[in-house]
Structures are given as C-alpha cells and as structure tokens.
Image (cartoon, rainbow, N blue to C red):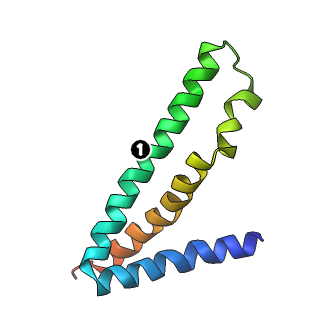
C-alpha cells in the first residue's frame, strides 16, 4: 500500500504537469483549487485547535483527531500532490 501511495505521489503530479502544459486554463484551475484546499484545511485545523484549547484538553489524542476529518484529509491530499506539481512545473518551465 505504501508503494502505491509513493507511485501516486510521483505519477499524479507528472500527469498534472502534462495537462497544465497542454492546457493553460488547467494550470489556473490547479492553482485555484490549491488555494481553496489550503483555506479549507487551515480552517479545520484552526477550529479543532481552538476547540481543544477552549476545553482545556491538550492531550495529544485530542489534538490529532482532526486527521480523521474528511474536510481536512481531502484538501491536504490535494496539496500533497499539488506541491510536487509546482516543483515539476518550475523545472519544466525553466529557461536556460
């Protein structure tokens, strides 16, 4: 399973790079989606940290339950492939 995740972290950003080079509007869509995902994940994280501090429960099990939240996992997963995509695009668009 770990090998599948590793391969997906390599293949998906390369496919995104190919699509972005082929269709310029796709690159803007990838950037817009990354912004929305960033704010979504940050909002979930901030609200869970605030709730934990408000209840005066700072146990590590309390603070890590946001990892099971789908509103955090989906945007974070996209950002996990978006960052390598941006790195690939910077390499592919480099003017020598």
Within 10 Å of disc 1 (Cα), the crowding (few <14, some 14-19, many 20+) is few
**Looking at the image, which residue is at 67% across and 30% down?**
63
| Residue that appears at 37% across and 83% down | 19
User: Mark 1 = which residue?
Assistant: 39
**Would residue 84 be found to the left or right of residue 54 on screen?**
left
Q: Residue at x 53, y 37 (%)?
A: 44
Tell me the quarter of the image containing the C terminus: bottom left
**Measured from the top left, where is residue 71 in percent x and y?**
56, 47
Give whichever of 92, 72 is nearer the camera: 72
**Residue drawn at (51%, 61%) of the image:** 78
Callout 1 secondary element:
helix
Residue pushed farthest front? 70
Which quadrant holds residue 59? top right
x and y percentages locating residue 4 in the rendered image = 71, 75
Which picture quadrant has residue 55? top right
Where is the N terminus found, in terms of image quarters?
bottom right
């Amino acid at each position: 399973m770990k090998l599948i995740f590793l391969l997906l972290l390599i293949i998906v950003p390369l496919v995104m790079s190919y699509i972005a080079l082929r269709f310029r509007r796709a690159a803007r869509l990838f950037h817009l989606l990354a912004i929305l995902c960033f704010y979504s994940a940050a909002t979930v994280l901030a609200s869970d940290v605030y709730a934990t501090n408000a209840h005066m429960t700072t146990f590590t099990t309390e603070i890590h339950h946001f990892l099971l939240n789908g509103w955090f996992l989906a945007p974070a997963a996209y950002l996990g492939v978006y960052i390598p995509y941006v790195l690939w695009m910077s390499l592919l668009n480099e003017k020598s």
